[in-house]
Amino acid sequence: MTLPSELKDRLSLPLIGSPMFIISQPDLVIAQCRGGIVGAFPSLNARPSGQFEAWLQRLGEELGDADAPFAVNLIVHRTNKRLEEDLALCVRYRVPVVITSLGAQERVNEAVHSYGGIVLHDVISNAFARKAIAKGADGLVAVAAGAGGHAGTLSPFALVQEIRQWFDGPLALSGAIATGRAIAAARMMGADLGYMGSPFIATREANADAAYKQMIVDGRAEDIVYSDVFTGVHGNYLRPSIVAAGLDPDALPEAKDMDFAALAGEGTKAWRDIWGAGQGIGAIDAVQPAADFITRLISDYRAAVEDFRP
C-alpha cells in the first residue's frame, strides 16, 4: 500500500476527521490538524459562497508545516450549483487534499492535480471505487455500514478486501470508527487511514447545538436510523432527533429527490433539525476539546498496535 508523503509524514495518527455538514468549520478543522490528523470540511458549509474563500485564507494563515494537512469536501453532483466556483478556489488556494462525493469527474481531478493536490473519492461499493480510480482519483474513502451521514450497507471487511484485490493506493475506511483501537483494526484490514466523524460532534469546537452533542454522548448504536427521506440519499440519523422533529422513525414519508442546490442557501431547516450520526457513538462518553479526544485516540491506537505484536 502506498500513501503520499503529505498524508504519511505529517500525521500523528492515521486518521481523517470526516467533513460533516454544518458541524465541520474552521475551529474544528484547525484543532484536528494541530492534533495531527487531517481536518476536513464541506465547501458548502461556508455560506454565503464568499465565506469559503475567507475560510481558506484563515486556514492558510493559521496552519503550518508542523500541522497535518486539511481537506475540503466537494459535492460533485449536478444539483450543486457552486461546484465550479468552489473548485476554482481550491485550485487558487492549493488545497492539499480534496475529498469528492456523489460523482467522479475527470476534470475535477485534473484541476486538483494541476497544483499537486491529492483527490480522495468516497464510495459505497467496489464498482464505484473502480469508476473513481478510472477517472483519476488518487485514493478512496470506503464508506461502509454504520458510518454517519450518507453511508453504505456493506460490511467494512467485504468492502476493503474487494478494493484491495486490485487497488494498492491510498484507502481510508469509514464506518462506526470511534476509538484508537478501531483505527488500528481498520489498518489491520488493509486500510491506510481511519475516517471518523460522529465522535467529533461531541467536541467543544464542533459547530453543533449543545443538545446534539449531548445526544451523541447519550446515544448507542440502536439509536441510529438508516433512511433516504431527508436528502434523497441513504444515511444514518439519530432517532431522538427525528422524534423531536415530530416524525415517527418507524413510519417515515417517501424520500424526495436528491438536491444539493439548497445547501448553498439558507433553506436547510430540515437538515438542522434531523441530526446525523454513525453507529459508533456508544464509545463516546463526554463532550471535550478536540485536542483531548485526539490525544486519547493516539494513546489507544498505540496500545492496540502493541497488543498486536507477537
Image (tube, rainbow, N blue to C red):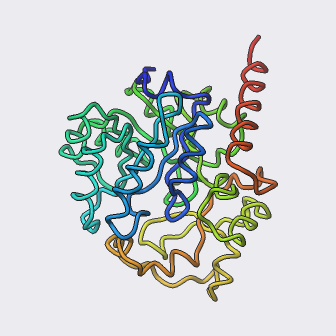
Q: Position of residue 217 (x, y in %)?
A: 77, 60
- Res. 259 image quadrant: bottom left
Q: Residue at x 78, y 25 (%)?
A: 303
State whether residue 60 is above or below residue 64. below
Q: Answer left or right for 112 relative to 123.
A: left
Q: Quadrant of residue 223?
A: bottom right
Q: Quadrant of residue 44?
A: bottom left
Give the vertical position of 291 relative to 234 (above or below): above
Q: Is residue 262 above or below residue 151?
A: below
Q: Nearer the viewer, residue 309 or 70?
A: 70
Instruction: Name the one closer to the observer, 290 or 182.
Output: 290
Residue 280 placement, left or right of 163: right
- The C terminus lies in quadrant: top right
On screen, residue 250 versus residue 26, left or right, reads: right
Identify whether 263 is placed above or below 188.
below
Report the quarter where the N terminus lies. top left
Tell which of 227 and 12 is nearer to you: 12
Give the x, y percent position of residue 308.
74, 19
Residue 304: percent from the left, percent from the top?
Answer: 75, 26
Residue 239 coordinates in the image, percent (x, y) = 68, 73
**Which residue appears at 39% of the width and 26% of the height?**
169
Q: Residue at x 20, y 35 (%)?
A: 114
Furthest toward the top, the residue is 310
Label total for image? 0
Q: Is residue 297 left or right of residue 147?
A: right
Q: Residue furthest front?
A: 61
